[in-house]
Image (cartoon, rainbow, N blue to C red):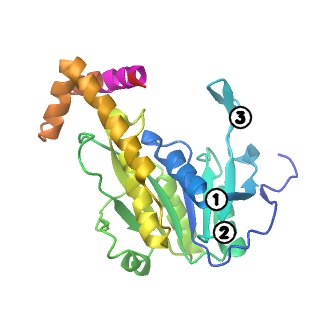
Amino acid sequence: MSGKQPLEIYTRPEAYGSPLVIGWAEDAGKLGPKVIDYLNEKLGGEEFGEIDPEEFFPLEGVSVEDDVAQFPECKFYRCRESGLVIVRSYPPRSEWFQFLNLVVDVAEHHCQAPELYTFGAMISLSAHSTPRALLAVANSPEMKGSLDGYGLATDLDYETPPGQRPTLNSYLLWVAKGRKLPAASLWVPIPFYLVANEDPRAWKKILEFFDNRFDLSLDFRDLDDRIASQDERIDQVRLRYSEIDRYIRKLENNLPLSQEENERLVKGMEELLEKTD
């Protein structure tokens, strides 16, 4: 372990009273990276700090995408006009408590954030044409009450199975609660056969909440085009491959698929959507 401090702030963010939003770079349907990158692009996010990955991420398993090595990182961005602080991070592989406390340090000491949000994908057995829902878990009754009026499902009952770790997002809510920082975790269901691809409908569902919550005045026409384009690609696959069409029709009619049918649909969509790109 080096003597370097894990949290490095390059410049004062000057974002006092700014809510903090964190998304994970590894997520089903590319939810985390796409939502964070969209916000940064639309709101003019400027990088002001980072967490050194050395203590939290194994570097021996670096992946390569399009001939570029994907090194784990955690970056902080400020959006001057909207007053939002955005965090784009890979999920830490170790030292969760220390890592998440560093994130809350930025929210508390550098931004004086009134609230913190994280989000993630839930795997759903529904069809891609099913409207996306948005679920929320808050770390206090007061935070839950503040989310009324946004069309969120908040009456969730869930307990981490014995012997398993809580989700990273649940852990973050617990850390924030210990620091008396109101926080919420947002969840959007993603069709199981789009987990390895993209789900722009899910991206939009999360972004619409942030747009309404923070009055961002986002223009979603480009995202609507992305959704229409994916629908067209899936329609092409369904026209060419009757088996895929039959599976999706069953899902659209709320009929269950067998395990074998699930696997064939996942494999087929992964391969065929790549071909239609």
For label 1, the SS is loop
Q: Residue 86, percent across and down?
A: 61, 60
- Give yes or no for contact between labels 1 and 2 (Cβ–Cβ under 8 Å): yes
Q: Give the main secondary structure, helix, strand or loop, of the magenta stretch.
A: helix
Alpha-carbon distance for marks 1 and 2?
Answer: 8 Å
SS at circle 3: loop
Q: Earlier in the sequence, mark 2 or mark 3?
A: 3
| Residue 4 place in picture, x, y as percent | 86, 52
| Residue 61 in view of the camera | no
- Residue behind mark 1: 44
Left-right relation of 141 to 45 = left
- Residue 56 x, y percent position in the rendering: 68, 47
Q: From the top left corner, tell me how far across and down residue 204 is, in percent.
A: 40, 53
List the residue tagged with mark 3: 59
Q: Which mark is residue 80?
A: 2
- Is residue 52 left or right of 263 when viewed as pictured? right
